[in-house]
Amino acid sequence: MNLQSRVNGDERNQSNRCVIAYGLHNIEGGVSTVYLNLAKGLRAQGWRVFSVGVGTYAARTYNPAFADEGSVILAPQETEIVPRVRAFLAWAEQEQIDLVIPNYESTIIAALPCLPPRVRCLNICHGVIRSHYLAAVAHLSRLSRVVALSRFQERELLHRFGVPRSKLRLIPNGLDLDRFQRLQRVANRGEPLRLIYVGRVNNAHKGVLLIPPLLKELASRDIPFSLQIVGSGVELPRLEAAIKRMGLKEAVTFLGQQPPEAIPELFEHSDMFIMPSRWEASPMVLLEAMAAGCVPVATLLPGITDMMVTEGVNGFLCPMGKAGAFAEKIARLHHDRQLLAEMSKMAQRRVAQGFSLERMAADYDQLFTQVLAEPPLDWTPIPPEAAVYPWELQPTWRAKIPEPVKNFLRPWLLRLAGRLG
């Protein structure tokens, strides 16, 4: 584990455009994937980029598969907020950090008011539940910009969470296509459909418990298939048990968590990607599937998945939680392999044209350059001893609601939010 910066402040290359601290716990998930892609693109344009986690939780959960040469863990033995803030501030001064993006990193969020005015701060909203929005707008007066990843988030941040239009910027995620352009996809002309699920095995977020009834529906239609499930999570035992009860164990392979570099080839050898998510912000795994020519069958999340998938052209979008709708789309491509091949090519084209790493890096490059060219905010830093984690992000009465009740309510609330949007 990299417990300290690998580049000392006195070694700073003056030709670099600035130094960025990107708050991150390097764990499996889309936020880590976004960092790995964005950092690569920004470094190519002359920025120095660090991912930074602080404290015992960051150290305990650190996964080197989702980190890179710029990943840093500070104060790995520290649990209290003030010492963690002190550690981050000292490191930021040492590394001459110019731009801070806290994301969800609690220590960096708490440290924002302590940073000197010369350090510009902005945040990226990586999710679509209340805590994600609150984390993105914490210390809003100290932020120069808030970045939305989707049109849905943009509306929410503007109308529900009080971000001024002047501070709001829409930058959809982008993907490093180098790993996908080397793939040699072979069209499936008549073999059983090769399905794949990639992501955390979590039902509240990813809707994975829709998979067993979906597979049952396919079996009842006599549609031959195989399914690979890639990922780990709390719902894995329930998912395995449900598939076994339905007598479909032989058709399903559980591969567990795989390193990022293995994902393109897994998609290359799959025909269709199942994404039954209940909420997403700007799902990187959907872009990865499409870049590999793996046709997505995903939940319709208005202003989110329909930014990437055009129904019937480069994939399919289904109502949330409707196994029959997912099965119907899969059955259609089982019976029309020519359409499957055409949609595969269109999926690749869509990502290349609108969601490349080059486009994302150029958008952030422009944003960062603009923010750094602006006068510093009129801000008087508070002492580290006064740093606290914002009360809005502290556990509320919502934490007392049983998780099964939350899981039941979330799909209905998200459907309603989509319709209102």
Image: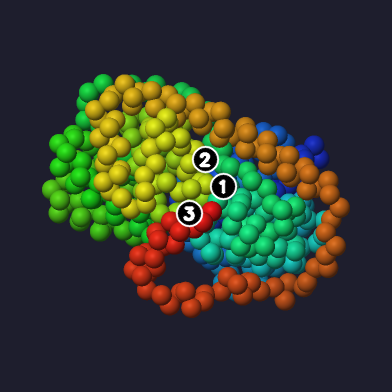
| Kind of residue sitting beneath label 3 | Arg
Q: Residue at x 15, y 51 (%)?
A: 246
Query: Residues at badges 1 and 2 in contact (C-beta under 8 Å)?
Result: yes
User: Can the viewer see residue 28 in this picture?
Assistant: yes
What is the x, y in percent for residue 153?
57, 53
**Drawn side of residue 114 relative to residue 334, left or right:** right
Circle on res. 150: 1
Q: CA distance from mark 3 to mark 2?
A: 16 Å
Circle on res. 9: none
Is residue 39 shown above or below 232?
above
Mark 2 secondary-structure assignment: helix
Depth check: 212 or 376 in front?
212
**Drawn side of residue 27 relative to residue 226, left or right:** right
Quarter of the figure with residue 239: bottom left
Colour logic: rainbow
Q: Which residue is mark 3?
A: 419
Query: Residues at badges 3 and 2 in contact (C-beta under 8 Å)?
Result: no
What is the x, y in percent for residue 305?
47, 44
| Kind of residue sitting beneath label 1 | Ser
Instruction: Please identify the residue farthest to the front as the structure is shown.
Output: 420
Q: Nearer the viewer, mark 3 or mark 2?
A: 3
Q: Which residue is mark 2?
A: 307
What is the x, y in percent for residue 281?
51, 50
